Image (spheres, rainbow, N blue to C red):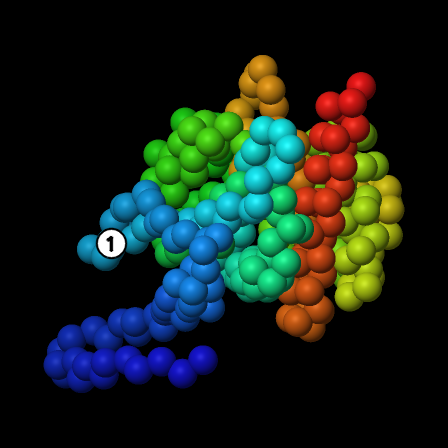
Amino acid sequence: MTMKTEVTIPALNERHTAIPQRRPADRLLAQLDQIAEGSTNVVKKSFGEFESQGKSYSLPRYVFMGPKGGGDTIRLGIFATIHGDEPEGALAITRFLSVLEKNPELAKGYCLFIYPICNPTGFEDNTRFSRNGKDLNREFWTDSPEPEVRWLETEVWTHAFDGIVTLHSDDTSDGMYGYASGAVLSENLLEPALREAEQFLPRNSQPEIDGFPAQNGIITQCFNGVLKAPHNLQRPPFEITLETPQKAPLHRQVEALSIALQTILVEYRYLMAIAANI
């Protein structure tokens, strides 16, 4: 990616400090913005303004309203780029929304709240951490002062999501894997999602992934402070994290995450239909 940068010649007695090259988020969001501008289903509603090093930022949010279903609307939150050096999830969201635009029935009964860049300063700087030096995915529900975390926590509280899906890429994995918050969800949501994603990427079959016991690419434990719902909710959402192997070809990661998201929509709607008939 070519960027124009200003060149300043320091005085002879001045100590020269290199200015890091930053990636503009608007380029990553350009296609999403284009989809929103031409769509009757997608609306862009950025939120959560904060400042870093004298510059103002906000968190991009897109809302996709699917065709009305037979029951209550299912509210699903999809989050990506919580680590700034993992833009693969944001690109997968772009692919996912373009598919839904062509076939909105896939999202029948859903309202999707989509957060493609949860760590804008980390994305600009191409680092895992925010510009404050924090791994934001260890800060949730810890009384963190980090503005990105506080704004996203408010979103989770406000919208009372039925499901939360986070997208990551792992440069230490040779295959795709995922976390799920229970055996039933592992079997009925994450397993089908990973199975469909295998059209594009192999599955991580190691018995231990990220330091946790794993079975067929599925982990049921996770680190403290990750982006999820708070404890002790009366009606907790399902929670799934999808991880692609970051060293795999980018287009395969994008397609794998997109088909996994589509599969989760289909399978969760099916589970809700069964529950309604019990």
Relative to 178, is 147 on the left or the right? left
Identified by mark 1, the residue type is Ser
Q: Quadrant of the C terminus?
A: top right
Q: Nearer the viewer, residue 63 or 40?
A: 40
Q: In this orientation, does residue 152 appear?
A: yes
**With respect to residue 178, does 17 lie above or below?**
below
Q: Residue 77, located in which quarter of the rendered image? A: top right
Q: Residue at x 86, y 46 (%)?
A: 216
Q: Report x, y in % for residue 44.
A: 39, 53
**With respect to residue 217, does 23 lie above or below?**
below
Q: In this orientation, does residue 77 appear?
A: no
Q: Residue at x 78, y 64 (%)?
A: 201
Q: Residue at x 45, y 80 (%)?
A: 1
Q: Report x, y in % for residue 96.
A: 60, 59
Query: At numbered mark 1, what does the secondary structure look like: helix, strand or loop?
Result: strand
- Mark 1 neighbour class, 10 Å CA radius: few under 14, some 14 to 19, many 20 or more: few
Which residue, given by chain and number where applicable, does mark 1 sit on?
Answer: 56
**With respect to residue 234, does 105 lie above or below?**
below
Q: Report x, y in % for residue 154.
A: 40, 32
Relative to 82, is 263 on the left or the right? right
